Amino acid sequence: MGRIAMPLRQMGCRVEGERPPITLRGTAELQSICYESPVASAQVKSCVLFAGLQASGETWVSEPSPSRDHTERMLEALGVPVLRNSERPTAVGVRGGAEWRGFEMVVPGDFSSAAFFLVAGAIVPQSSVVGTQVVLNPLRTGLLEVFRECGVPFRVEGGLSELGEPWGDVAVEAAGPYRPFRISGDLVPRMVDEIPIAAVLATQCDGWSEIRDAEELRVKESDRIERVAEGLRNMGATVETFADGMRILGPCRLHGATISADGDHRIAMAFAVAGLVAEGQTVIEGAEAIGTSYPAFEEELWRLAVV
């Protein structure tokens, strides 16, 4: 949590600890700051903006590339002025003291959670999957650009909105063979949580797929670059790793293996999908970590299974 503690300390909040448990002690008045985030992180940005609503003056956050903008969309929908800078498109700010009224909303489905089933629909032969009522925020749906590059057939039915968030349905059908893909640059923050399942998709593409500029994956719930590479190799895939990503050769006939989730929910879900196209049994140790973000994942997976 150090990356969030740092700007909060600059604003006058006393923060003790870099990892949980963490102690925070507020102050009578937070100070506004202009924070240069070293990473494109909607979580860091949102924390600073929320604190800025209670600070004096204007608080700004700038990033190396655009991150997800759910917080800005909701604040604007509630009537809170969100500040922009035409000369710095990755900078956003708020003024302290803004107020808004209570509200009701329907929370659309999480695209990152739906992504596991969408990829399953693409790689399991004769499959067809529809993710209903999911967020279609363009800063969240980078996986669909990977689908376009690969040639995965999909369709989007949208047109709905909830407090500034577009949402709708995404349908995917299995086809193949698929073309290899490359993920890098500004596409990374738009699908950073979907990269583990995109790596599984890469094993079913024809040629080398490459993921770069994704060093952020090394500081998630686990080192996702190493965990994904290790698991795919155990299942028979050819994977090369770099400090900021990996290369995966396909198509590969995966075989069952025992996979350690290492306490990471997205690793566990990604390899559950890999197990659907693997020969033999796949065992995921630590699968209870899935409850972090998708407690009903196993139930939904069995519901879609055709025996």
Image: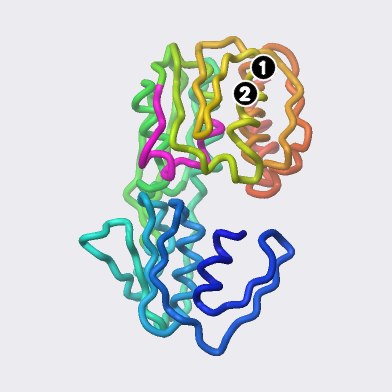
Estimate the x, y position of residue 305 in percent, counting from the top left.
64, 26
Which residue is located at x 40 percent, y 42 percent? 141
Between disc 1 and disc 2, whose residue precedes? 1
Place of residue 285 in the rendered image (x, y in percent of width and height, measured from the top left): 78, 32
In x, y percent, where is residue 131? 49, 39
As helix, strand or loop, the secondary structure at mark 1 comes to: loop
Where is mark 1, residue-wise? 235
Quickly name the residue at label 2.
274
Q: Is residue 247 above or below residue 222?
A: above
Quarter of the picture holding the C terminus: top right
In the image, residue 247 sits, relative to residue 14, either above or below, namely above
What amino acid is at disc 1?
Met
What amino acid is found at the position of numbered circle 2 in the picture?
A: Ala
* Element assignment for label 2: helix
Residue 226 appears at what percent x and percent y?
63, 31
15 drawn magenta? no
Q: Nearer the viewer, residue 19 or 193?
A: 19
For disc 2, the neighbor class at 10 Å (few under 14, some 14 to 19, many from 20) is: many
Q: Which residues are magenta?
A: 181-197
Q: How is the image coloured?
A: rainbow
Q: Is residue 33 left or right of residue 88?
A: right
- Residue closer to the observer: 22 or 307: 22
Q: Quadrant of residue 180?
A: top left
Residue at image location 42% in from the left, 80% down from the top: 100
